[in-house]
């Protein structure tokens, strides 16, 4: 059910859940002031309770109300990247941010999204929690059609068209005097160099996961994905590849985009993964010959998770 910004605000004020567009992916929103709305998000998504939610704000000025202290660099990061696809994990004001939202952690994740409809809504409603609007473990939703496919036609959806970035926000967390990447996302690690003076490192699997939710299976279609740096001659069947590359003639190529344009591949990634299931594809080979830099890191990480 498509709703207007005003209708969405009224529903959220009464504790309901609404799907909301952001520049990254669609979110499933509830007001932080409505515990029953927050609980409904977990049950609708079938999301484990120990996977915390991101609090979305209309502006960074509100941050001090919901945090206790800001680590070095937080203000500069917010100033540079908000509104936009950056999420910061910060010490939470545990009175203002319910334990259910934080999965009982002393921290909470925050972001100011860029999508004009999300911002218009947040201005009316105040802070909203918004996990990605997909069933837990499924590819994220980048269009109203994807949201309705997962949650049915009755769920109120604020239609903001197709998401421009197509992959989730980059999550940064401050540990041992440095910012680390807790989740690769729409902003590549290199983009933080100028503000921080260093490129934040990724939390690796040897490190303790930054929160329990990180260990869950993610982004996966039902189809089996085979990641391959080289598509051998004679390959048949579905190949997820690039529009400017040649593949063996028997392949049915689904293009992610141009191999020189990671933004194209990011924007199409979840659509392509969802199309596999819509078309009952059992198995697809992925042309995994992509650089280990920039936004390609995020695309490769999502594909790895989708294949695992
Ligand atoms: O782009 C996005 O970030 C989208 C749009 C809708 O804003 N939202 C999104 O939410 O991707 P979700 O719930 O799918 O992913 C949020 C992730 C959690 O899985 C968890 O890993 C991390 O954020 N997170 C949340 N709170 C955290 C915390 N206190 N400490 C560490 N990680 C946290
Ligand atoms: Mg998600």
Image: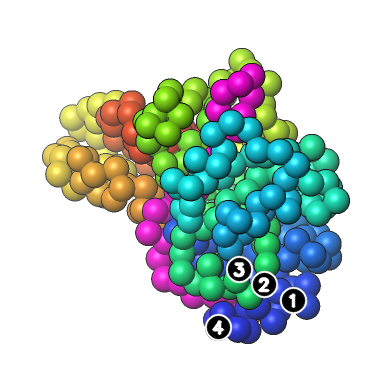
Q: Are marks 3 and 2 in contact (CB under 8 Å)?
A: yes
Q: Is residue 21 visible?
A: yes
User: Across the whole image, how many numbered discs are drawn on residues?
Assistant: 4
Which contiguous range is marked in magenta? 150-179
Q: Tag on residue 13?
A: 1
Q: Quadrant of residue 41?
A: bottom right
Q: Secondary structure at mark 2?
A: helix
Of the residues under marks 1 and 3, which one precedes in the sequence? 1
Q: What residue appears at the point 58 percent right and 54 percent down from the top-left corner?
A: 60
User: Which residue was labeled with disc 4?
Assistant: 4
How many other residues sit within 10 Å of disc 1, few (<14), some (14-19) or many (≥20)? some
Q: What residue appears at the point 53 percent right and 67 percent down from the top-left corner?
A: 119
Q: CA distance from mark 2 to mark 4?
A: 13 Å
**Where does the image place residue 47, in percent across and percent down from the top left?**
72, 50
User: Which residue was labeled with disc 3?
Assistant: 122
**Where does the image place residue 200, in percent across and percent down from the top left?**
48, 26
On screen, residue 197 above or below 114: above
Which marked residue is nearer to the observer: mark 4 or mark 1? 1
Which marked residue is nearer to the observer: mark 2 or mark 4? 2
Q: Secondary structure at mark 1?
A: helix
Q: Are marks 2 and 1 in contact (CB under 8 Å)?
A: yes
Q: Tag on residue 125?
A: 2
> Which residue in the rendered view is the most extreme toward the top?
206
On screen, residue 108 above or below 113: above
Of the residues under marks 4 and 3, which one precedes in the sequence? 4
Of the residues under marks 4 and 1, which one precedes in the sequence? 4
């Amino acid at each position: 059910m498509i709703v207007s910004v005003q209708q969405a605000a009224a529903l959220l004020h009464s504790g309901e859940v609404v799907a909301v567009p952001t520049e990254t992916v669609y979110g499933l929103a509830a007001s932080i002031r409505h515990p029953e709305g927050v609980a409904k998000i977990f049950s609708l998504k079938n999301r484990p309770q120990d996977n915390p939610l991101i609090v979305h704000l209309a502006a960074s000025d509100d941050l001090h109300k919901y945090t206790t202290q800001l680590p070095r660099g937080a203000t500069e990061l917010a100033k540079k990247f908000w509104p936009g696809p950056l999420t910061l994990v910060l010490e939470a004001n545990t009175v203002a941010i319910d334990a259910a939202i934080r999965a009982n952690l002393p921290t909470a994740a925050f972001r100011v999204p860029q999508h004009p409809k999300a911002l218009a809504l947040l201005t009316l409603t105040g802070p909203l929690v918004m996990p990605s609007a997909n069933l837990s473990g499924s590819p994220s939703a980048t269009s109203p059609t994807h949201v309705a496919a997962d949650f049915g036609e009755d769920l109120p959806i604020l239609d903001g068209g197709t998401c421009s970035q197509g992959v989730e926000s980059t999550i940064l967390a401050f540990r041992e005097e440095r910012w680390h990447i807790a989740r690769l996302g729409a902003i590549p690690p290199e983009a933080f160099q100028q503000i921080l003076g260093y490129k934040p490192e990724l939390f690796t699997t040897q490190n303790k996961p930054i929160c329990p939710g990180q260990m869950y299976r993610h982004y996966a279609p039902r189809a089996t994905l085979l990641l391959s740096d080289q598509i051998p001659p004679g390959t048949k069947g579905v190949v997820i590849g690039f529009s400017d590359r040649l593949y063996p003639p028997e392949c049915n190529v689904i293009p992610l985009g141009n191999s020189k344009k990671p933004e194209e591949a990011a924007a199409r990634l979840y659509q392509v993964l969802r199309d596999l299931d819509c078309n009952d594809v059992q198995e697809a080979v992925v042309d995994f010959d992509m650089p280990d830099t920039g936004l390609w890191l995020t695309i490769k990480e999502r594909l790895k998770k989708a294949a695992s």
